[in-house]
Amino acid sequence: MAVAMDTGVPWVMCKEDDAPDPVINTCNGFYCDYFSPNKPNKPTLWTEAWSGWFTEFAGPIQQRPVEDLSFAVTRFIQKGGSFVNYYMYHGGTNFGRTAGGPFITTSYDYDAPIDEYGLIRQPKYGHLKELHKTIKLCERALLSADPAETSLGTYAKAHVFSSESGGCAAFLSNYNPTSAARVTFNSMHYNLEPWSISILPDCKNVVFNTATVGVQTSQMQMFPTNSELLSWETFNEDISSADDDSTITVVGLLEQLNVTRDTSDYLWYSTRIDISSSESFLHGGHHPTLIVQSTGHAMHVFINGHLSGSAFGTREDRRFTFTGDVNLQAGSNIISVLSIAVGLPNNGPHFETWSTGVLGPVVLHGLDEGKKDLSWQKWSYQVGLKGEAMNLVSPNVISNVDWMKGSLFAQKQQPLTWYKAYFDAPDGDEPLALDMGSMGKGQVWINGQSIGRYWTVYAKGNCSGCSYSGTFRTTKCQFGCGQPTQRWYHVPRSWLKPTQNLLVLFEELGGDASKISFMKRSVTTVCAEVSEHHPNIKNWHIESQERPKEMSKPKVHLHCGSGQSISAIQFASFGTPSGTCGNFQKGTCHAPTSQAVLEKKCIGQQKCSVAASSSNFADPCPNMFKKLSVEAVCAPSTTTNA
């Protein structure tokens, strides 16, 4: 059908080895240098080069070092790859209920070169930019020859593109994850970092090494804004609404999405049970235990309108069981289960067959008769919440709801509560976020637009460290263990009015809405490190054309964000410094003028560059290999000028 549409351009199918001709099968993954299309006349395409990984509620933040990402892309190019598409290049936000998975967070930042807020993530953005500039220098050779592979040692290889017209480009690789390599190529010696590739656009001069990062590292933080949330009001969701006219009643338990058709995350399951006044537990015995099995994704259990407990699945194990003692009374009792979807399934084998909701069994233990299976009783179903039906989130609807004014303190731990407040747009133009760390689980809207699902659930994982070298897996570079998986929720400024913006949220569990606040995201610190012998594209142009011109010295480039300037130099050392951004330390060799030189050239500037050369600093240790490491503070320009 696709081919018959005669679009005039080729169709591609990712991760489908048996894609029929003329459809081109392509690769998705962290690495694709192993991949070949199913016919030799098809180009080798990498449709998803994963720049990081998504985040799931209760999971850690995943990061992928740019040294490994650039190594993977260069491996693909050196094997004759034709095309690379980064997934993601710009991170984003799953506004509304668009997050899938299930259990994928509202943030889809993905550790991408441009982050969720539209800010450049360094060094990932800059290092990839340098990589592609370098690949562009190899253009003539890459487009006119196939690579010839030769061994340079146990872990080292050369891939050479050599055209009849004289173009030549070489890729020298070291696959050893722990040791550097010294190799000989075309009668010249080259040092290769562990797990890296050096690119020689003329088969002589190194212009780029995947593991040698010369661009700055930017550190971002969230800062408070001048915007206050005022005039808080609350409205308690009506739990008894699960028993009103808009319910449907059937015998047995129904699959959730077949009932809701995804018009809401929420579905009420309600049933009645009569308890005899002679039951032993009513006369000093142990309360009965209710067991509810769910196929996903979360639930809150209410007995006669009071919260009895909650239970949640995970992305790895959507199915879960609620087990809890329940406070039943003599006579008729209502058991209400609010089942919650946390995103539609969107990936995996036959995910269209996955179930959601309470499919049982639902069993009551501890009655005098033993266990009582409630699964095949009459159950009533109510799609969505009362507040959703009344459109409480819209700023344009005149509601007849009796919102309650007054102290938020009394509402702090009240489940199923709607909150609303008004606020003015924060000053400035920095990207904004809502700090929801004081709340439990729910959804939030601004001026009727859904910011998304929020859930303050703490991350479990292995945050023991991160090395760029060695094969990358999602378990390798994890961060944020023991912290909320997501605390800040992106608010586009374009959704705001200057004044009288409406914030509405629905809280399932209970939280402290008075601590919700608006934050702004900006660069706080920039670091850069470059050696005297850092590869340099300018020098390649000079060397390749054999011009009698002085070689350009490698430079550190520092660049603060929009509206900022460099307010302080926290660290500067030309010599043998060690450490990483935020933890630099002076070495045995250090130029005493380092700090003064950087302060003179950079303080008060939005950006500056300083060459790593003895002419700038006076050589502190002749005949030693030296580098320049710098850490600078970025602050709003007005503060710096004052």
Image: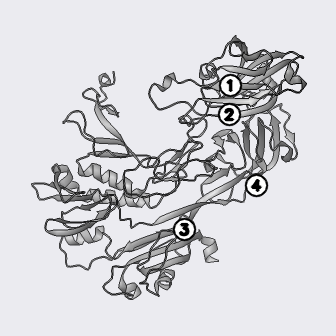
Closer to viewer: mark 1 or mark 4? 1
Q: Disc 2 and disc 1: Cα gap in Å?
A: 10 Å
The quadrant where residue 417 appears: top right
* Residue closer to the observer: 23 or 542: 23
**C-alpha distance separating marks 1 and 4:** 42 Å
Count neighbours of disc 1 (C-alpha within 10 A) and say few if under 14, some if 14 to 19, many if 20 or more.
many
First reached walking from the N terminus: tag 1 or tag 4: 4
Judging by the rendered image, the residue that carries numbered circle 3 is 525
Q: Earlier in the sequence, mark 2 or mark 1?
A: 1
Residue under the point 77% across and 28% down: 302
Query: Viewer-nearest of labels 4 and 2?
Result: 2
- Disc 2 residue type (three-letter): Ala
Name the mark on residue 228.
4
The kind of residue on which mark 4 rests is Glu
Per the model, the C-alpha gap separating discs 3 and 2 is 41 Å
Q: Secondary structure at mark 3?
A: strand
SS at mark 4 in the image: loop
Tell me the quarter of the image containing the C terminus.
bottom right
> Which numbered disc flags the more N-terminal residue, 4 or 2?
4
Image location (x, y in percent) of residue 345: 52, 30
Helix, strand or loop status at disc 2: strand
Q: Amino acid at mark 1?
A: Val
Sequence-wise, which precedes: disc 3 or disc 4? 4
Mark 4: few/some/many CA within 10 Å (<14, 14-19, 20+)? some
Q: Residue flagged by tag 3: what amino acid is it?
A: Thr
The answer to whether the residue labelled 2 contacts the one labelled 1, judged by CB atoms less than 8 Å apart, is: yes
Q: Is residue 394 left or right of residue 123?
A: right
Q: Residue at x 72, y 12 (%)?
A: 377
Residue at image mark 2: 311
Report how far apart the C-alphas of labels 1 and 3 lie in the structure: 50 Å
**Label 1 belongs to which residue?**
292
**Residue closest to the far top:** 251
